[in-house]
Image (spheres, grey):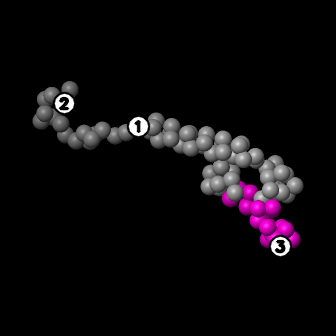
Amino acid sequence: DSIVSEFATYEDYLDSQINDTDLYYLEDEDLARQLVELGYRGSGETLKREEFEGRKKAAEQARINKLRAAPKALASAGKDVSAFPLLAS
């Protein structure tokens, strides 16, 4: 998910939808975040904290599964083992 990979935390995600004008008039970053979270400000549909965290965990699990599924090269790959009859089967 691009949103989850782009932002490290939910607060970073909310901050991305706040502009300088919002902060000028509201004078409070937490209030601006709350307005975005409630859907009064921001672009498009805003993810709730639980949904963001769920997507973040799913993306991390997918990344871990991908790393585990990658084939690993053997230490003997590409080596000449013909001199060792037990290894060259």
Q: Main secondary structure of the magenta part?
A: helix
Q: Which element type, helix, strand or loop, lies under badge 2?
A: loop
Residue 44: horizontal and vertical position, in percent?
83, 51
Q: Which residues are magenta?
A: 12-32
The residue that label 1 is drawn on is 71
Quarter occupied by residue 18: bottom right
Q: Residue at x 69, y 57 (%)?
A: 11
Residue 49: horizontal and vertical position, in percent?
72, 47
In this view, the mark in front (1 or 2): 1
Q: Residue at x 13, y 29 (%)?
A: 85
In this view, the mark in front (2 or 3): 3
The residue that label 2 is drawn on is 88
The residue that label 3 is drawn on is 24
Kind of residue at badge 1: Pro
Residue 62: horizontal and vertical position, in percent?
56, 39
Q: CA distance from mark 2 to mark 3?
A: 74 Å
Residue 6: horizontal and vertical position, in percent?
64, 55
